[in-house]
């Protein structure tokens, strides 16, 4: 297999500062959507933060459990400059990309402008969660409608 054969069609990073809320929800929904559509060989998902928290926010774990997604065993992690260099799309969660990711990347940046769920009531976290889920479905619709370019 050549290096280009091993590369997936799309590589997406979901990034925020703590990697304990929005980016964890986005990555989990993206993983589920990738599995539902059977496109594991076409889409690679990375998540991380620039200043990772010690654990995923409990309110986020609770909200995601309502969607049958268990985040209780996930640990926030630091996103590396190498990971950001390798992705096609960096999705930041509501902070400007320069504030969140001082590293540079080759791909496109999209900022989803989402509120931070930390220390918010569960009703507001559910709204944030639902918006992330809708955006993930739309992102997959967009990415999978594109024809991969020849390298």
Image (cartoon, rainbow, N blue to C red):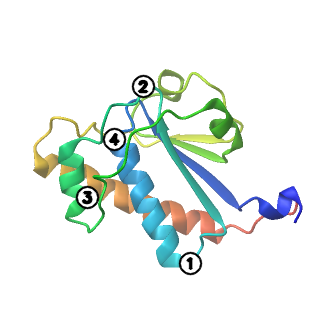
For label 4, the crowd category at 10 Å Cα-Cα, with few meaning under 14, some 14 to 19 and many 20 or more, is some
> How far separated are the C-alphas under marks 4 and 2?
18 Å
Front residue of 134 and 58: 58
Helix, strand or loop for disc 3: helix
Helix, strand or loop for disc 1: loop
Q: Residue at x 70, y 43 (%)?
A: 86
Helix, strand or loop for disc 4: loop
Q: Residue at x 31, y 42 (%)?
A: 21
Task: Give the residue pinned by disc 2.
Answer: 51
Front residue of 73 and 36: 73
Q: Is 147 situated left or right of 130 in this image?
A: right
Q: Which numbered disc, 3 or 2, marks the residue that appears first in the sequence?
A: 2
> How far separated are the C-alphas under marks 3 and 1?
22 Å
The quadrant of the image that shows the N terminus is: bottom right
Q: Is residue 110 above or below residue 5?
A: above
Task: Give the residue pinned by disc 3.
Answer: 64
Callout in the foreground (1, 4)? 1
For label 2, the crowd category at 10 Å Cα-Cα, with few meaning under 14, some 14 to 19 and many 20 or more, is some
Q: Which numbered disc, 4 or 2, marks the residue that appears first in the sequence?
A: 2
Callout in the foreground (3, 4)? 3
Q: Is 122 situated left or right of 101 in this image?
A: left
Occupied quadrant, residue 18: top left
The quadrant of the image that shows the C terminus is: bottom right
Q: Residue at x 26, y 68 (%)?
A: 68
């Amino acid at each position: 297999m050549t290096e280009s054969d091993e590369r997936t069609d799309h590589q997406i990073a979901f990034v925020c500062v703590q990697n304990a809320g929005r980016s964890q929800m986005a990555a989990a929904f993206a993983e589920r959507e990738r599995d539902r559509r059977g496109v594991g060989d076409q889409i690679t998902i990375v998540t991380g933060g620039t200043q990772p928290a010690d654990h995923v926010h409990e309110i986020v774990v609770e909200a995601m459990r309502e969607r049958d997604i268990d985040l209780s065993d996930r640990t926030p992690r630091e996103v590396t400059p190498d990971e950001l260099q390798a992705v096609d799309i960096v999705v930041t969660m509501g902070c400007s990309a320069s504030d969140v990711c001082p590293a540079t990347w080759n791909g496109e940046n999209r900022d989803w402008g989402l509120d931070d769920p930390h220390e918010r009531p569960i009703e507001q976290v559910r709204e944030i969660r639902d918006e992330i889920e809708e955006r993930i479905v739309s992102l997959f619709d967009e990415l999978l409608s594109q024809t991969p370019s020849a390298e």
